[in-house]
Image: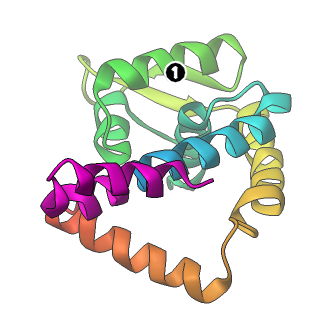
Amino acid sequence: MDTIGLARAKWEQHGWGGAAEGMAAVTSVMRAQQILQARVEEVMRPFDLSFARYEVLMLLHFSSRGSMPVKKAAQRLQVHPTSITNSVDRLETAGLVRRVPHPTDGRATLIEITDLGRETALKATEAVNRDVFSQPGLSGRRVSTLVNVLEDLRRSAGDFG
């Protein structure tokens, strides 16, 4: 039973036909996000990481110095600085990152990945590549189509600043 398909039919029956397809699209994307989030969380669990904390680790891993200001990390990950602070607190408690003073700006703090953080990031990446990213639940061509469609949606929402 496709509950979203049933909801679309109910939308049409209630005279909301002009919005039925959009409702089905939005609801489908939100449900897909829940499915993928659950898969990623399952893979991250052995590393004691959420996807948000994993993203912070990978951002630092890919940075040229292995560190960056908190504000810049928030901008790169497109989240509120409070969210980064929460993730960094957890990562720091686990010994995966550390806060260090900015060398030229006394008001700023850098987040720096530790050796353990880099090792954990790489192991978590192996797992998520193997168990989620390499087999997201769609064929290769459909994955490309989905990426393109979602890119259009993100672009129209101003996601490319």
User: Which secondary structure dominates the residues rendered in magenta?
Assistant: helix
- Can you give x and y, in whole percent of width and height, for residue 64 in the image? 50, 55
Per the image, the residue denoted by label 1 is: 88
Instruction: Report the front residue among 131 and 14.
Output: 14
Was residue 13 drawn as part of the magenta stretch in this picture?
A: yes
Name which residue type carries label 1.
Val
Q: Which residue is drawn at 79% across and 29% down?
A: 45
Instruction: Report the front residue among 79 and 121.
Output: 79
Q: Is mark 1 on a helix, strand or loop?
A: helix
Image quadrant assignment for residue 12: bottom left
Q: What stretch is highlighted in magenta?
A: 1-26
Q: Residue at x 28, y 64 (%)?
A: 21
**Residue 28 vertical placement versus 98 (above, below):** below
- Can you give x and y, in whole percent of width and height, for residue 122 in the image? 77, 50
- Furthest residue in direction front, as rendered: 13
Was residue 59 drawn as part of the magenta stretch in this picture?
A: no
In this figure, what is the number of numbered marks?
A: 1
**Residue 143 vertical placement versus 67 (above, below):** below
Q: Residue at x 36, y 29 (%)?
A: 70
Label 1: few (<14), some or many (≥20) within 10 Å? many
